[in-house]
Amino acid sequence: MIIQKTENSRISSFDPENYSFGDHFTDHMIICEYENGAWGEAKLMPYGPLPFSPSNMAFNYGQACFEGMKAYKDSNDEVYLFRVNKNFERINKSAKRLAMPEIPEEVFVGGLKALMDIDRAWIPTGEGKSLYIRPLIFATEEGLKARVSNKYMFAIVAAPATSYYSAPVSVKISDYYSRAASGGVGFAKAAGNYAASFYPTQLANEEGYEQIIWTDDSTHEYFEESGTMNVFVRIGDTIYTPPTSEKILDGVTRDSFITLAKHKGIDVRVEPIAVKDVLAAHKDGTLKEIWGVGTAVVTTAFKSFGYQGQNFELPVLSEEDSYALSLKKALVDIQTNAAEDPFGWREKVEKDVLQTV
């Protein structure tokens, strides 16, 4: 790895008590370029802009994917990553679907640990705080012919993170727009998936909803995801979540929630969730919770949902009674080294990593 440390750290200008999610970036970033059929040597360098022209093929043809991860500090100021192997596997799954070269493990994992070590001072401590990490791959060749690019860049940037939503949100169940279609790229973290979701979300916002529960593209009768999150429904004492597919992202937080719930003896059913069944459960009083999970939010509880012009309120539960909140606490406790990790998910970032890369 080529290492170029910044001579002008910006850490003194960062107020850990006053910032928003994703609006400050750490001192350094990782860059690695692909050309002539091979990835070059990774570089750790000062964070900053890169020179690209409007003819960049990523801008024109959308070859771009990314991951979302977090680093955490415990009470002893030690730094931990979470389930790194899952994100590494998924970014390459996304890259393959978008006809981009897969990133080598030593570049992804080695770069990640080097960046966390050198910028560990940027990782905030306290409830709901972490460092959000964004690995990404995108085309860099200049050209206006619709084809696969011959040049790419892998990068990792990071930003201090706070709670994404500070309170439960209201959601609209979509009966027209879909997030993904059969045979498409819904299972990949393709940048274009998010761009396509913004307009329907804007429309929902105008109706007073913060987010959307996406339904299937063919019938709009089944839940798929919610906003940029995987979705969970609790009916009675059973948790339901849709199975992953070519349309539904294999979320790391989703998998962690399922594993934790089963570990606690909660009945979890990975099966299709019909809108009509959710409405029926609300009517008979057995619908207890609906929530979304993802790296950025960890968990977002829903206070109500709208469907075809009607609004339905959800019960207000204490943390003790809420599966969503109790599972969130259990997960965050593992991530921040506040509890035992029986699954081997947590990975400590050793100090002075740069001396070994």
Image: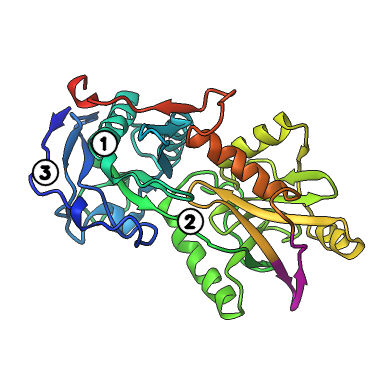
**Percent position of residue 79, x then y:** 36, 33
One can see residue 251 in this view? no
Disc 2 is placed on an element classified as loop
At 48% from the left and 49% from the top, the residue drawn is: 127
Colour mode of the rendering: rainbow
Asked whether the residues under the numbered discs 1 and 3 touch, taking CB atoms below 8 Å apart as contact, a structural biologist would say no
Q: Quadrant of the N terminus?
A: top left
- Image location of residue 210, percent across then percent down: 57, 69
Q: Identify the disc placed on residue 136.
A: none
Q: Return the x and y of residue 88 as percentages of the image width and height.
A: 42, 32
Rounded to the nearest angstrom, the CA distance separating label 2 from label 1 is: 22 Å
Q: What residue sits 39% from the left and 45% below the top? A: 125
Report the residue marked by disc 1: 115
| Relative to 337, residue 145 above or below | below
| First-in-chain label (2 vs 1) | 1
Front in this rendered view, residue 203 or 141: 203
Question: Badge 3 is on which residue?
Answer: 6
Q: Is residue 315 magenta?
A: yes
From which residue to which does the magenta span run? 304-316
Question: In terms of sequence position, does the residue under pointer 1 or pointer 3 come before the other?
Answer: 3
Q: Which residue occupies the extreme front position in the image?
A: 76
Residue at image location 17% in from the left, 34% down from the top: 43
Q: Was residue 192 drawn as part of the magenta stretch in this picture?
A: no
Q: Amino acid at mark 3?
A: Thr
Q: Residues within 10 Å of mark 2 (few under 14, many from 20)?
A: some
| Amino acid, disc 1 | Leu
Q: Nearer the viewer, mark 2 or mark 1?
A: 2
Q: Earlier in the sequence, mark 3 or mark 2?
A: 3
92 shown above or below 216: above
- Please identify the dominant SS of the magenta region: strand
Residue designated by label 2 = 163
In the picture, residue 219 is in which quadrant? Answer: bottom right
